[in-house]
Image (spheres, rainbow, N blue to C red):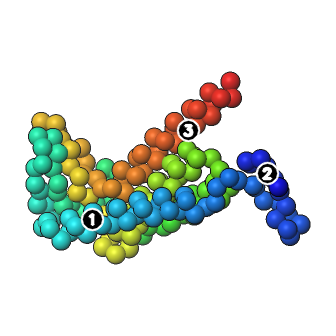
Amino acid sequence: MATKVGARRSNGNGGARRGTAYGLAPWLGVAVIAILLDQVTKLTILKTFQYGEFHPLTSFFNLVLVYNKGAAFSFLAAAGGWQRWFFTLLGLVAATVIIWLLKRHNGQKMFCLSLSLILGGALGNVIDRVIYGHVIDFLDFHVGGWHWPAFNVADSAICVGAVLLVIDELRRVRRGK
């Protein structure tokens, strides 16, 4: 029997569950791919670069090995060490909430893709914090003498996911009018 996407149907235990066209697995798969890309690139940089070493690839892009003990833009990087566990816990709480949202809304493609990228990025950086005590950054874009803060694949996944989340919400609002 076909069920409309988002419709409620019985789970056989007297309760109801949200019927969806997609399971949770594809979305977790996207997160795992983001984590793997992040960790493989970080391990490659760790094996080939010394801390602080950089290699210009273009007039606006370098590969560099730097460590970030803080959050975005090195926020709280100079704190006394507690930030490692704070940001680890924050990442794990965010991952838990994201997985819950993926379960509730797993038929909404753009929404779930955005959450999956954010999940993969968050967990990629959590892995760094647990293993190394800091996040490994290596992508350095610059114009003239101005450098954007170095970042990594996990950060990129989070940013792309956030942009997709905004686009998805704008589309949802537009459809509601």
| Secondary element at tag 1 | helix
Left or right of 174: which side holds 18?
right
Query: Please, what is the three-letter code of the amino acid marked with disc 3?
Result: Asp
**Numbered tag placed on residue 3 in the rendering:** 2
Q: CA distance from mark 2 to mark 1?
A: 44 Å
The quarter holding residue 126 reads: bottom left
For the point 73% across and 48% down, which residue is it? 5
Q: Mark 2 touching mark 1, by CB under 8 A? A: no
The quarter holding residue 25 reads: bottom right
| Secondary element at tag 2 | loop
Identify the residue at the far front of this view: 1
Residue 22 at x, y percent in the picture? 64, 55
Nearer to us: label 2 or label 3: 2
Query: Please, what is the three-letter code of the amino acid marked with disc 1?
Result: Lys
Left or right of 16: which side holds 77?
left
Left or right of 107: which side holds 78?
left
* Residue 86 appearing in the image: no
- Give whichever of discs 2 and 1 has the lower sequence position: 2
Q: CA distance from mark 1 to mark 3?
A: 30 Å
Question: 95 and 81: which one is in front?
Answer: 95
Disc 3: CA contacts within 10 A as few (<14), some (14-19) or many (>=20):
some
Q: CA distance from mark 2 to mark 3?
A: 24 Å
Query: Please, what is the three-letter code of the amino acid marked with disc 2?
Result: Thr
- Up-down relation of residue 8 to residue 165 (above or below): below
- Give whichever of discs 2 and 3 has the lower sequence position: 2
Location of the C terminus (image quadrant): top right
Residue 162 at x, y percent in the picture? 47, 45
Residue 31 at x, y percent in the picture? 47, 60
**Numbered tag placed on residue 42 in the rendering:** 1
